[in-house]
Image (spheres, rainbow, N blue to C red):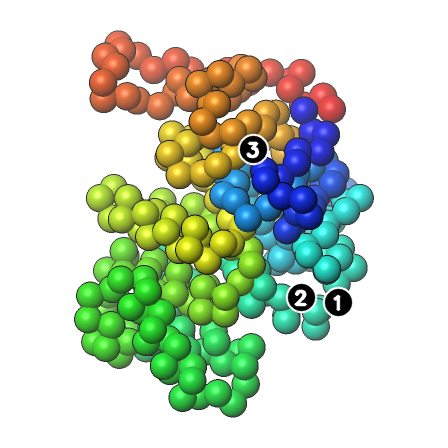
């Protein structure tokens, strides 16, 4: 089912995507990565879930025009508030990226600059959209470190990325992405690189901040059981298509065999099973 999937509780959606297609073109070889997906997003937490290679990250990157040159992106509509993302110029996209739409990536190790103190990097995220405001930026960066609940923000401000833990690094990334008060946050597997205990703390923090600030969130994950606890709605992607869209609270009643397979393919501590079922895939699911 790829017809329009309306945003929950929203008259005018924050984001309206209709028939998004992304092909990677390498000479004569064309790889369809996203095959015509449509959805709307309000001020809510929307998960995009599917196994590796299903096209989740490509959707996130296409929204921000962060795809490589080999990607051909087409859509009937890709509207973010008053901005037509399909026709936005590079200058308009620079003004939107990191300000109105922010993206948190999987591993802070690769997203933070190793030779710049983390506090400076958070301040720089503010300054890049408010040039010249050096002192305001420093103060706001300190405030953001408190908002993301790092212990001893003054000390962390002065640290280089290798001097802080993975969990602190991801809190720093969240501070950096939220300092400009974006309307939309795209989080691409934001906790996959973290230990399980830290993962839950960072998720709880992200959840609180999204609620407090009234943001729209697109949460990209391969872990359907994680998103069911955390998100309002779930889009299930298989090989570039949305095969099912439903409220997270309705996942138990999922109709599509792929969604049922994803739910069944995860181990459950309370359920003793000799063997996990193998995830089934069928070519017919690729038909529009
Ligand atoms: P996911 O985020 O669900 O793991 P991706 O969006 O990263 O999936 O990838 C979707 C498909 O697009 C995969 O088949 C992947 O190999 C292909 N792909 C992603 N990036 C590129 C690229 N730069 N060049 C060619 N193919 C790519």
CB under 8 Å between discs 1 and 2: yes
Seen in the picture, residue 173 relative to 52 is either above or below; the reply is below
Report the disc number at residue 25: none
Q: For ligand 1, tell me if the residue under mark 2 lies within 8 Å.
A: no
The quarter of the displayed image where residue 37 is located: top right
Q: For ligand 1, tell me if the residue under mark 3 lies within 8 Å.
A: no
Q: Which is in the foreground here, disc 1 or disc 3?
A: 3
In terms of secondary structure, where does tag 2 sit?
helix
Comes first in the chain, label 2 or label 3: 2
Seen in the picture, residue 122 relative to 13 is either above or below; the reply is below
Comes first in the chain, label 1 or label 3: 1
Residue 11 seen by the camera: yes
Is disc 3 surrounded by few (<14), some (14 to 19) or many (20+) residues within 10 Å? many
The span from disc 2 to disc 3 (Cα, nearest Å) is: 26 Å
User: Mark 1 sits on what residue?
Assistant: 89
Is disc 2 surrounded by few (<14), some (14 to 19) or many (20+) residues within 10 Å? some
Quadrant where the image shows the N terminus: top right
User: Mark 3 sits on what residue?
Assistant: 235
In terms of secondary structure, where does tag 1 sit?
loop
The span from disc 1 to disc 3 (Cα, nearest Å) is: 29 Å
Residue 50 seen by the camera: no
Residue 145's x, y, as percent?
31, 69
Residue depicted at x 65% and y 41%: 40
Residue 23 or 192: which is nearer the viewer? 192
Residue depicted at x 45% and y 69%: 179
User: Mark 2 sits on what residue?
Assistant: 93
Residue 53's x, y, as percent?
54, 36
Residue depicted at x 60% and y 16%: 282
The span from disc 1 to disc 2 (Cα, nearest Å) is: 6 Å
Residue depicted at x 34% and y 15%: 276
């Amino acid at each position: 089912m790829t017809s329009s999937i309306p945003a929950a509780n929203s008259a005018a959606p924050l984001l309206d995507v209709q028939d998004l297609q992304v092909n990677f073109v390498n000479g004569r070889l064309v790889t369809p990565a996203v095959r015509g997906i449509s959805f709307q997003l309000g001020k809510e937490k929307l998960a995009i879930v599917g196994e590796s290679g299903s096209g989740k990250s490509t959707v996130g990157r296409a929204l921000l025009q962060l795809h490589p040159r080999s990607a051909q992106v087409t859509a009937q509509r890709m509207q973010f508030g008053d901005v037509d993302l399909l026709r936005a110029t590079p200058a308009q996209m620079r003004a939107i990226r990191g300000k109105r739409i922010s993206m948190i990536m999987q591993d802070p190790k690769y997203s933070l600059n190793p030779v710049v103190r983390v506090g400076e990097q958070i301040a720089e995220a503010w300054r890049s959209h408010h040039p010249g405001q050096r002192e305001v930026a420093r103060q706001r960066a300190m405030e953001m470190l408190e908002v993301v609940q790092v212990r001893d923000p003054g000390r962390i401000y002065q640290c280089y990325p290798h001097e802080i833990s993975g969990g602190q690094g991801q809190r720093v990334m969240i501070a950096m992405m939220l300092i400009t008060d974006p309307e939309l946050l795209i989080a691409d597997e934001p906790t996959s690189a973290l230990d399980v205990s830290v993962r839950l703390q960072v998720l709880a923090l992200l959840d609180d901040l999204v609620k407090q600030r009234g943001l729209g969130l697109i949460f990209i994950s391969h872990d359907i059981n994680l998103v069911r606890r955390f998100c309002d709605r779930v889009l299930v992607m298989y090989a570039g298509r949305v095969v099912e869209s439903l409220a997270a609270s309705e996942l138990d009643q999922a109709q599509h065999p792929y969604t049922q397979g994803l739910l069944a393919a995860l181990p459950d501590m309370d359920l003793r099973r000799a063997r996990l079922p193998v995830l089934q895939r069928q070519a017919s699911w690729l038909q529009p």
